[in-house]
Amino acid sequence: MNIRMIFVMTLLMSAFDVLAHSKMVVKSVVDGPGIYSDSGIRGPKFRDQIKEMRKVASQYPDLVRLVEYGESRRRNTLTALLFEPQNTMVTKFAVVTGAIHGNEYMNIVDRLSLALLKSPANVLREYISTGGALLVVPIVNPDGYDRRRRGNSRRVDLNRDWPNSTTPKPAQFEEPETKALADWIDSYLQQHPLTKLDLAMDYHCCVDGMLLKPWGYQKGKYLTQAEDERFEYFIEPMLKYFPKPGKVGTPPDLLYSAQGTTLDYWYAKYGAISLTYEGTRRKEKDYLQYQVLWWEDMLRNL
């Protein structure tokens, strides 16, 4: 290879390096902290999410309090809102979670609290007054959320980290984000022995409003007929209220098998009505009113 050829190849390689670097720079700006998610919906930085939660807690101190239930690997404070009665025993308990995959922010869970509080139907207030508690966790995976990344700061998929006693080799919690949430809920239930976890909903993106129910880890494994009928009380409102409801079924039948999910964990451990909602890309921020109607019916059914 002559000197001219070497010189030309060196120039080309330098040009490719510059181009690659420029693409990386553009990507880091577009995919920067809290700016976009795979859902195509803008989201505030996690610290601003916490500020909004504090604001809700300060506006409705008789109904809700801020809960700090642990730390992420990057020492973000894991934060939730807990709605609970002040002068009544807790006899019902529901959990709603979002952004366990940091790049699947849906702009639903973080707005759901205020939307339910401001709804003229007052279903959330009635639920609380009759012994109901509701834990709202808008961002389960703050490290991934602030980096538009599916996994946490160790790049672990947090929705594969939940032990399931029905599988041949149950996993163990390995990430602080999952263990902290599971431990807090278990502790809360021990403090309120008259209740159990009744309902758990986890919001994901993006499969056109699909609703998933157990079991997710094995194709051909289904709820019994009696269990399925119990789930229908909570699934039917979505089919009634949503303009274009998605398919309903198990993950292996509609998507793929997955072990270690919240979907199977909450049902296996507590017998909860456990569901995963797979939202529609770019559209969910406009569907909040349908989510509120759905949640109001679900709370009525608890």
Image (cartoon, grey):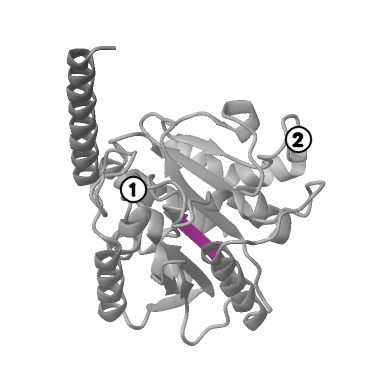
Quarter assignment of residue 13: top left
Q: In the image, residue 99 lies at what x, y percent?
A: 41, 52
Q: Which residue is drawn at 49% across and 56% down?
A: 154
Residue type for callout 2: Lys
Q: Residue at x 76, y 53 (%)?
A: 170
Q: Give the range drawn in magenta.
A: 93-97
Secondary structure beneath dot 2 equals: loop
Answer with mark 1 or mark 2, whichever residue precedes in sequence.
Answer: 1
Q: In the image, residue 77 lies at what x, y percent?
A: 40, 73
Q: Residue at x 53, y 45 (%)?
A: 276
Q: Residue at x 17, y 23 (%)?
A: 11
Residue type for callout 1: Arg
In this figure, which residue is indicated by the disc labeled 1?
148
Q: Residue 221 carries which label?
A: 2
Q: Residue 134 carries which label?
A: none
Q: Alpha carbon of mark 1 to alpha carbon of mark 2: how far?
A: 33 Å
Quarter assignment of residue 165: bottom right
Q: Could you classify mark 1 by the number of other residues whose Cα lies within 10 Å: few (under 14), some (14-19), or many (20 or more)? A: many
Residue 81 lies in the magenta-colored region: no
- Quick one: which residue is furthest to the bottom in this view? 87
Residue 94 lies in the magenta-colored region: yes
Secondary structure mostly seen in magenta is: strand
Secondary structure beneath dot 1 equals: loop
Which sits in the foreground, 234 or 101? 101
Q: Could you classify mark 2 by the number of other residues whose Cα lies within 10 Å: few (under 14), some (14-19), or many (20 or more)? A: few
Looking at the rendered image, the quarter that the N terminus falls into is top left
Q: In the image, residue 153 lies at what x, y percent?
A: 44, 57
Up the image or down, 119 lies above or below 216; here it is: below
- Quick one: which residue is furthest to the right in this view? 168
Q: In the image, residue 74 lies at what x, y percent?
A: 41, 67
Which sits in the foreground, 301 or 214? 214
